């Protein structure tokens, strides 16, 4: 059997390039999840992407990305040219910006930003120092030449700003996601558990099972990661804004720390932003970019993400293909001594069996770990222990199958037969054999439950596929004779 990629790939897709044929190429190259950035979409254009993804395969998960609580420049008709040493004013409001005063979309800006702070615009392209306050405006000193453009992001490193967690556009898109059976909502600039709960309330009001991915991209999010994880399905480490809010030299250690926390909590984690940025316009990445992708995999991330590379880049399929090749290469050379210890809670049977399955797979050199799952929980737990063997999860519904598209090493598919537990094991193994994932001579670890669908995980079985399917058939035959 060919080498299998365990690390998942999230690819950002724009309505400008979302034809089914293109999406099929990305899927064949290794894409597992499609990301839709709502900052650049309308519900109509986003729905076109969704429909085309579903034409390709119902196993591709769809994630929408919200705007979240951020500040942007406003009402700038023509870019404002600035030079180092210039003095300007900035304030919140609705009036037009001028050459000496520019407006932001946060009315309380002048009241909440302390003098002495630094302000960064457009992902750090421009830097200003807050030097005073005059009336309802802040006076700023320009630190480098450039242009202030309209609707550009503003960051105030080290300063917590009391913005509402959800914009009106965010609320509209979250409700749209619920109506259109989207799999994940990745909420931007999550600062604390209240931000996550605000998204969850909208989903609960819509009775939606959509899972929340919290984007960590500011100091508050890093500091409050434990409570954020309590209420999140998973985390995205969005290194773009994070690298502006926090000194760049601290990002690698923060990335590793966040990955480890997610693994210990058995929750998927995505590393994002500029992983292969040069491939937007170049067919080949830099060696530093390849090392960046590799280091995220060495750190044990579940997924890696492409943004502009696939949304509007010139070499999208090549970027996904390269990520796949790097992932396969690194996954086979990881040092097991660097694995993250995953704690088990008292009487947590699923976690105990998941760890035992992975240990058995490592010691006995089985071909795969196989499980059937109603909620995806046991598959995510097995994933947390980062088995070098593929984990084949047989799911009872398509939503759970797609949710597992973010979990390291888990290859999910739908259950064909939902009859008694013996038939379930047999049909799962035979389906994987038919699809070339395993052979009848392979030894596998099967993790399952004796108490019916939804009854929880209760056993591990290790045997050849031929013997396991034969025993299930015999067991069924013997039972019918009694």
Image: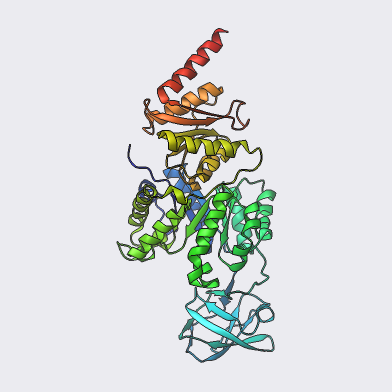
212 sits left or right of 401 in the view:
right
Give x and y (percent) for residue 72: 57, 74
How many numbered circles are shown? Answer: 0
Give x and y (percent) for residue 217: 55, 65
Quarter of the figure with the C terminus: top right
Tell me if residue 458 comes above or below residue 209 in the rendering: above
Kindly give the residue lying farthest to the front in the view shown: 337
For image coordinates 56% across by 52% down, the residue present is 262
Tell me if residue 435 comes above or below residue 292 in the rendering: above
- Give the camera-side residue of 150 and 447: 447
Quarter of the figure with the N terminus: top left
Residue 238 visible in the picture: no
Residue 289 visible in the picture: yes
Give x and y (percent) for residue 313: 37, 62
For image coordinates 54% across by 48% down, the residue present is 341
For image coordinates 44% across by 30% down, the residue present is 444
Kindly give the residue lying farthest to the left in the view shown: 283
280 sits left or right of 218 in the view:
left
442 sits left or right of 348 in the view:
left
Give x and y (percent) for residue 240: 49, 67
Tell me if residue 317 comes above or below residue 159 in the rendering: above
- Give the camera-side residue of 421 and 138: 421
Tell me if residue 201 comes above or below residue 57 in the rendering: below
Colour setup of the view: rainbow
Kindly give the residue lying farthest to the top in the view shown: 481
């Amino acid at each position: 059997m060919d080498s299998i990629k365990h690390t998942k790939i999230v690819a950002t897709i724009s309505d400008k390039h979302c034809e089914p044929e293109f999406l099929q190429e990305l899927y064949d190259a290794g894409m597992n999840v499609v990301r839709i950035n709502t900052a650049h979409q309308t519900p109509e254009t986003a729905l076109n992407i969704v429909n085309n993804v579903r034409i390709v395969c119902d196993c591709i998960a769809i994630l929408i990305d919200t705007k979240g609580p951020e500040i942007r420049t406003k009402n700038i008709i023509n870019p404002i040219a600035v030079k180092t040493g210039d003095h300007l004013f900035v304030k919140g409001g609705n009036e037009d910006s001028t050459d000496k005063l520019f407006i932001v979309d946060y009315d309380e800006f002048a009241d909440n930003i302390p003098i002495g702070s630094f302000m960064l615009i457009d992902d750090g392209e421009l830097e200003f120092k807050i030097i005073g306050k005059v009336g309802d405006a802040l006076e700023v000193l320009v630190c480098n030449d450039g242009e202030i453009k309209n609707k550009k992001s503003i960051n105030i490193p080290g300063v917590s700003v009391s913005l509402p967690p959800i914009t009106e556009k965010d609320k509209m898109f979250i409700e749209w996601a619920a109506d259109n059976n989207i799999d994940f909502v990745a909420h931007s600039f999550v600062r604390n558990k209240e931000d996550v709960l605000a998204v969850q309330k909208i989903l609960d009001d819509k009775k939606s099972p959509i899972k929340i991915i919290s984007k960590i991209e500011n100091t508050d999010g890093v500091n409050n990661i434990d409570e954020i994880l309590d209420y999140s399905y998973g985390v995205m480490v969005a290194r773009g804004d994070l690298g502006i809010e926090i000194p760049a030299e601290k990002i690698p250690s923060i990335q590793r720390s966040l990955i480890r926390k997610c693994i210990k909590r058995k929750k998927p984690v995505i590393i994002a932003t500029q992983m292969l940025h040069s491939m937007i316009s170049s067919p080949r990445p830099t060696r530093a970019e390849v090392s960046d992708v590799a280091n995220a995999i060495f750190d044990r991330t579940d997924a890696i993400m492409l943004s502009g590379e696939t949304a509007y880049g010139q070499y999208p399929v090549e970027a996904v293909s390269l990520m796949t090749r790097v992932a396969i290469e690194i996954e086979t050379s990881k040092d097991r001594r660097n694995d993250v210890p995953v704690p088990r809670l008292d009487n947590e049977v699923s976690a105990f069996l998941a760890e035992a399955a992975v240990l058995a797979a490592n010691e006995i050199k089985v071909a795969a770990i196989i499980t059937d799952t109603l909620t995806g929980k046991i598959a995510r737990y097995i994933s947390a222990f980062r088995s070098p063997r593929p984990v084949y999860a047989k799911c009872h519904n398509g939503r759970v199958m797609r949710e597992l598209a973010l979990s390291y090493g888990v290859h999910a598919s739908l259950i064909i037969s939902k009859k008694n537990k013996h038939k379930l094991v047999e049909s799962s193994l035979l389906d994987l054999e038919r699809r070339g994932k395993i052979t009848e001579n392979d030894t596998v670890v099967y993790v399952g439950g004796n108490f019916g669908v939804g009854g929880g995980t209760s056993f591990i079985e290790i045997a050849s596929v031929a013997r396991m399917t034969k025993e299930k058939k015999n067991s069924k035959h013997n039972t019918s004779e009694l």
